[in-house]
Image (tube, rainbow, N blue to C red):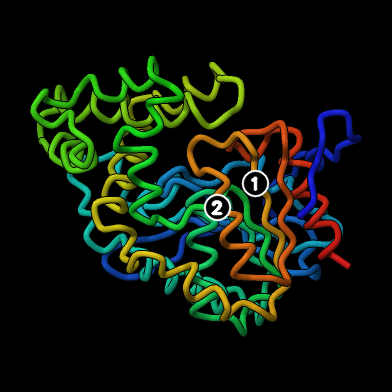
Amino acid sequence: MSEHHADQHRRTLYPPIEPNRHGMLAVGDGDEIYWEECGNPSGKPAVFLHGGPGAGSSAEHRRLFDPARYRIILLDQRNCGRSIPSASDHATDLDANTTWNLVADLELLREHLGIDRWQVCGGSWGSALALAYAEAHPDRVTELVLRGIFTLRRSELEWFYEGTCANIAPELWQGFVAPVPEADRVFGRYIDAYARLLADPDPAVHGPAAVAWSTWEASTITLIPDPAVIATFAEPSYALAFARIENHYFVHDGWFTDQQLLRDAPRLADIPTVIVQGAYDLCTPAITAWELSRALPSSELVMVDDAGHAFDEPGILHALITATDRFAE
């Protein structure tokens, strides 16, 4: 295990770039996903998997890779970002939005773009999707660059969404529980209570619930709360898509059996892997990253000792770009 410290010279994001091309890909079930390609069309293929699920990709994610050496692929997963139909429309049915359909979508996109193998980079939920994809298709993955490890184990969901984390952020937790009926303010009931709130057709019910859910996450993803991030997550349209998709996945435990991603990690033994983890990550505590590194003894675990969960905290950025630079060779 290696560490990065506050006084260390750090890599920063590559300069802003625009896509060379982009499009929509029909993936079935009436869903179309947005994709884009940036950087060097002849470079090393790499795909970035955003978090949430439901957060969507951003222009900053393009900048984790050297555009001179990488063919950079970004996408918005089903029903979020620029993909259609959007979960921000309460009428959008999420039944087809499952982990294994997203894994199939990645294979469809890889084939659509004519890519044989690619580096897979993802953080938070993106790390879970990256692991699920790589465990299903290890022959298609050149390297894994993972951050803020999340595997949707019951213990992880209970930590952040059922009240254990309230011991560290009690004031912020009060905002999360505010929409929940008193009878459901009990450990083990919050995720299901939110499922009912978010499914309610009345905007006066599902709207504030979505904002409360999203604000809880936005307020805890950085070591120091970032008002700009909180404001972005609290925008009603974004919040509704984000909260509906996340809650939908958590109610179903990500369509994983408990411990599945860690249990099947040895399938990835031959894939060079870097695991980047903020030591003070409240959303996805370091225990899961540590356990994944134990399941993959050949992996490199980089523990960033002055960071939380967000990909753009300086120490985490440094570690991610160090990894992508190394793997570009």
Q: Nearer the viewer, residue 191 or 199?
A: 191
Tag 1's secondary structure? strand
Q: Which residue type does callout 2 highlight?
A: Ile
Give the image location of residue 28, x and y in percent.
32, 70
Q: Is residue 129 left or right of residue 2?
A: left
Image: 254 above or below 50? below
Q: Which residue type does callout 1 highlight?
A: Gln
Give the residue number, with chain letter if any, for mark 2.
149
At x 62% / y 85%, what residue is drawn?
139
Give the image location of residue 201, x and y in percent.
10, 35
At x 50% / y 48%, what residue is drawn?
51
Give the residue number, with chain letter if any, for mark 1.
277
Is residue 36 something that shows in the picture?
no
First in residue order: circle 1 vs circle 2: 2
The picture quadrant where one finds residue 12 is: top right
Give the image location of residue 24, x and y in percent.
47, 60
